[in-house]
Image: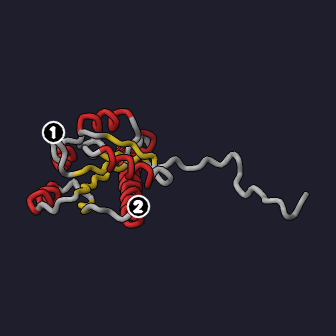
Amino acid sequence: MDPTAPTNTTNPTDETPEKPGILYIDSEEDNLVVFKSSFRRYFKVFTAMSGEEGLRILNSEPISLVITDQRMSKMTGVQFLKNLPEDRDLIRIILTGHSDTASILDAINSGKIYRYILKPWEKENLKNVMESAVEELKQRQANRKLVEELKSEKERLEQKIAELTQQMNQQKSKSAKPDKDTQND
C-alpha cells in the first residue's frame, strides 16, 4: 500500500445527511438564479416566481425553510407566509429591498416570521441565518418528539398505577373478609 496515496476516511456505508430543503420565492428571475447559485452547495434549493408556484413546490418537496420576497405581484411575502398550513413545520424568512415599516410590523406581529432581512443580502450572513434557522427547526422537532415520548410514558405509568391500585384494593378486600376456616374453629 502506498503511504502517500490518499486514504478514504469515510465509510462507504455511512449515509451523508440530506441537504435541508430551502424554498425561495421572488418575482424577479435574476434574484432566483443568484440565490440558487449561491446556496445550492449547502442546501437543496427550490425556487418559485409566485406564491402559487411556491405552494405547489411546498406540497411536493421536503422543505424546511421558506424565504420569500416581500413585494411580489399577486401577494406580499407576509400574506404568503400567513397562508401556509398551520400543521406544516417550517421556518419562515422575509427578504426584501424595501424597508416598509408597516410590512415589517405585520411580519413581526404575525408571529410566524423567523427573520426579516433587507436586500442586498451578504452571502455568508444569509447562509449563517439559514443554517441557524434549520438548526432551530431541528430543535423544535426534537423537542416535539421528546414531549410526545413523555406523554406516552406518562400514560403508560398511569396505566400501571391504576393496575397496581386495583391489585392492592383486591388484596385489601380479600384480607378484610373473615376467613371461613378461622370462623369454623
Front residue of 31/131: it is 31
Measure how far apart labels 2 and 1 are at the Cα level: 28 Å
Residue at x 39% of width, y 42% of height: 46
Query: In the rendering, which numbered label is found on residue 127?
Result: 2
The amino acid type found where label 2 is placed reads Lys
Residue at x 25% of width, y 44% of height: 27
Quadrant position of residue 146: bottom left
> Which residue, given by chain and number where applicable, does mark 1 sit on?
74
Residue at x 43% of width, y 55% of height: 38
Residue 30 seen in the current view: yes
Q: Could you tell me which secondary element the residue under label 2 belongs to?
A: helix
Circles 2 and 1 in contact, beta carbons < 8 Å: no
Residue 167 seen in the current view: no
Q: Position of residue 111 (x, y in %)?
A: 18, 56
Task: Relative to 184, say whether 132 is above or below.
Answer: below
User: In this rendering, would 110 be left or right of 13?
Assistant: left
Q: Position of residue 33 (x, y in %)?
A: 38, 47
Front residue of 6/58: it is 6
The amino acid type found where label 1 is placed reads Lys
Q: Could you tell me which secondary element the residue under label 1 belongs to?
A: loop
Quadrant position of residue 142: bottom left
**Label 1 crowd bin: few (<14), some (14–19), many (20+), radius 10 Å:** few
Front residue of 103/91: it is 103
User: In this rendering, would 144 be left or right of 106?
Assistant: right
The residue most toward the front is 30
Give the mark nearer the N terminus: 2 vs 1. 1
Task: Relative to 153, say whether 180 is above or below.
Answer: above
User: In this rendering, would 40 be left or right of 96?
Assistant: right
Q: Position of residue 162 (x, y in %)?
A: 35, 46
Q: Mark 2 or 1, which is nearer the eye?
A: 1
**Label 2 crowd bin: few (<14), some (14–19), many (20+), radius 10 Å:** some
